[in-house]
Image (tube, rainbow, N blue to C red):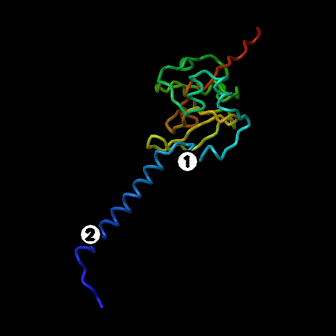
Amino acid sequence: MDFPRTENDMFDRRILLSTVAGLFGLSAFRWLTASPAEAGEKAAETFEIVKTEAEWRAQLTPQQYEILRNHGTERPGSSPLLKEHRKGIFACAGCDLPLFASETKFESGTGWPSFYAPIEGNVGKTEDRTYGMVRTEVHCRRCGGHLGHVFDDGPKPTGLRYCIDGFGLVFHPAAASAT
């Protein structure tokens, strides 16, 4: 026997569809705004150097700690390494692992030190879904310190731009050659 549809049936269907759409939207928003720690991305990774938060705080300056351990971002143009043009190596401020050679540094005009390639095997990548965006975060492979992000708008030969928070780095000038 076929029962005729009533106004209540249509109302119930609209409520169900609205609820499903709302839950879908909420879960999509939560996914897009999840921090890397909440998303479990770096939690699965283990690093050679592991310290307590107290040990990191004792070793790092407040600016370094904010960048490396809290995934912070420095103000554009505030890093002293932005204008560093000497030959040498840019290393992790947390563990001194060499990360970028000065030959790969370029002026991107963004206000952050930029490189087109890291030293092979020394920089790790994870998906970063903070601030409603999906980006690729880069970190030190030895201590896990946050360095910045990599984008595909860089120069040749890689086409990549490693946009790095300078306070997460230390610079070691190349030794002067004896003449």
Name which residue lies at 51% across and 24% down: 107
Check disc 2 and give the amino acid type: Phe
Write the residue at 54% across / 41% down: 136
**Where residue 70 sits: x, y (%)?**
56, 33
**Relative height, residue 107 to residue 26 (above, below):** above
Q: Amino acid at mark 1?
A: Ala
Determine which of the numbered discs, if any, sits on residue 39 in the image: 1
* In this view, 114 is above or below 152: above
Picture coordinates of residue 25, whole percent (x, y): 39, 55
Secondary structure type for disc 2: helix
What is the quadrant of the C terminus in the image? top right
Coordinates of residue 42 in the picture (x, y in percent): 62, 43
The label on residue 170 is none
Mark 1 packing: few (<14 Cα in 10 Å), some, or many (20+)?
some
Outermost residue, right side:
178
- N-term-proximal mark, 1 vs 2: 2
- Cα–Cα gap, marks 1 and 2: 37 Å
Residue farthest to the bottom? 1
Residue tagged 2: 11
Q: Is residue 125 left or right of residue 49?
A: left
